[in-house]
Amino acid sequence: MFDRNNRPEPFKNKVWLSSPTMHGEELEYVKEAYETNWMSTVGKNINEVERIICENIGCKYAVALSAGTAALHLAMKLAGLNLYGQPATGHGSLEGRKVFASDMTFDATVNPIVYEGGIPVFIDTERDTWNMDPVALEKAFEIYPEVRLVVMAHLYGTPGKIDELKAVCDKHGAIIIEDAAESLGATYNGIQTGTFGKYNCISFNGNKIITGSAGGMLLTDSEEAANKVRKWSTQARENAAWYQHEELGYNYRMSNVIAGVVRGQLPHLQEHIDQKRAIYERYKEGLKDLPVKMNPYDEKKSVPNFWLSCIIIDEDAMCKQVRGERDVCYVKEAGKTCPTEILEAIASINAEGRPIWKPMHMQPIYRMNPFITRNGNGRAMTNAYIEGSAVDVGMDIFERGLCLPSDNKMTTEEQTKIIEIIHRCFC
Ligand SMILES: *Cc1c(COP(=O)(O)O)cnc(C)c1O
């Protein structure tokens, strides 16, 4: 049916994984900042984006920052102070403490734990939403009962099993920091992600569902926390006539120019979600005859924002694929394929896919950190198959999964071509 050697013409304009989609209002608000000379980290755009996010997400306080990573860093600091008090050393408030974290996520979820001197303990992934596994989390509390902080991300815009994760955390008296950087606009039980943790983070990075070109926010219902973050993010100045400092400060506040871009994007969030959802549905329909599955979600409880569409190849349709730290090779087999072959095929028509985010416990920088699966210490095991399912779920999804071009400016014709080229890989 499909001839693997007869590739379609490459696209003239590259189809991206997920690129910024501008609408025009952004420029108006940036211009307003310029013309009124509020070209700093104060101004109407900042106030407005903070107000609108609170209104839309349903949180009491939103503090606009230079990046989602900055928001996560200050969330760690807040959590550390809240749990353990002022650090004796004046350095990280999590100094030497273990923190449970999502394993299959972008490294910005976990690096801030280390900024604060903490030790990330990675919790394996479940197969139903590709997020932190509540069973593995419970296991982790059995092994490290002293832990009081959990950082969880919602991968690719799909909410994790928040009810179960929260129940485990409540049982053990732990605080949640929610990394909703990829899931802005996604809901769980009808409630927006970014409201379930004590401190929550969103991102306006260039490839997210809406963007400021950069930027992020810390969301919380605690006025005290919001005030602390406002203060810390503007160099921790005390209320005095001169520069007076009693705490460690950061230059993390959002610029009013960036806020102008975010302000112009906000009215288009739902439109972007609708476009992303349509992309996901078209892939689902177009690939339904292949031995692959889309990135799953709980249709009863959650509405993802469908930021990235992904697939996972059935085990028996995988050809041999070997990944080193930097390189990869695979052995082609009739009727079988692997993420590498599909990614190469997609690239050959000038479109951008990406491997699944490589799990943190597999990253060289975190190779000494504990990793907990539902069977306990994942470092002590190989990826042996028990009762038909891999023990190290994150590694397995990384092996067999990939992210497809999910740009909301991709046309249906372009997407049809991508679907076709994926079919060819299974010839
Ligand atoms: C993008 C991202 C971040 C970081 O956001 P920035 O605004 O780029 O700093 C954090 N966590 C996850 C899961 C992300 O995808």
Image: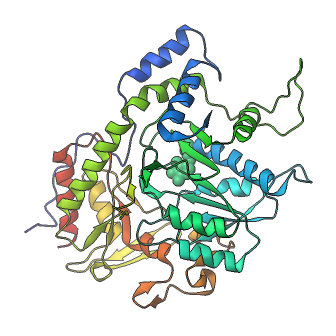
Tell me residue 388's x, y (percent).
39, 88
Tell me residue 383's x, y (percent).
50, 84
The answer to whether residue 118 is above or below residue 332 is above
Q: Seen in the image, is 347 located left or right of residue 134?
A: left
The answer to whether residue 44 is above or below residue 110 is above
Q: Quadrant of residue 146?
A: bottom right
- Point out the residue furthest to the right here: 88
Quick one: quadrant of the C terminus? Answer: bottom left
Q: How many labels were placed on the picture?
A: 0
- The residue positioned 78% from the left and 52% from the top of the image is 82
Q: Quadrant of residue 322?
A: bottom left
- The residue positioned 43% from the left and 55% from the top of the image is 189
Query: How is this picture coloured?
Result: rainbow
Q: Nearer the viewer, residue 229 or 51?
A: 51
Q: Nearer the viewer, residue 25 or 141?
A: 141
Q: Seen in the image, is 161 located left or right of residue 334?
A: right
Tell me residue 72's x, y (percent).
64, 48
Q: Nearer the viewer, residue 228 or 102?
A: 228
Q: Is residue 193 visible?
A: yes
The answer to whether residue 118 is above or below residue 263 is below
- Point out the residue furthest to the left here: 1
Q: Nearer the viewer, residue 168 or 362?
A: 168
Tell me residue 282's x, y (percent).
21, 54
Q: Quadrant of residue 411?
A: top left
Quick one: quadrant of the N terminus? Answer: bottom left
- The residue positioned 62% from the left and 79% from the top of the image is 139
Q: Is residue 360 visible?
A: no
- Point out the residue furthest to the bottom here: 387
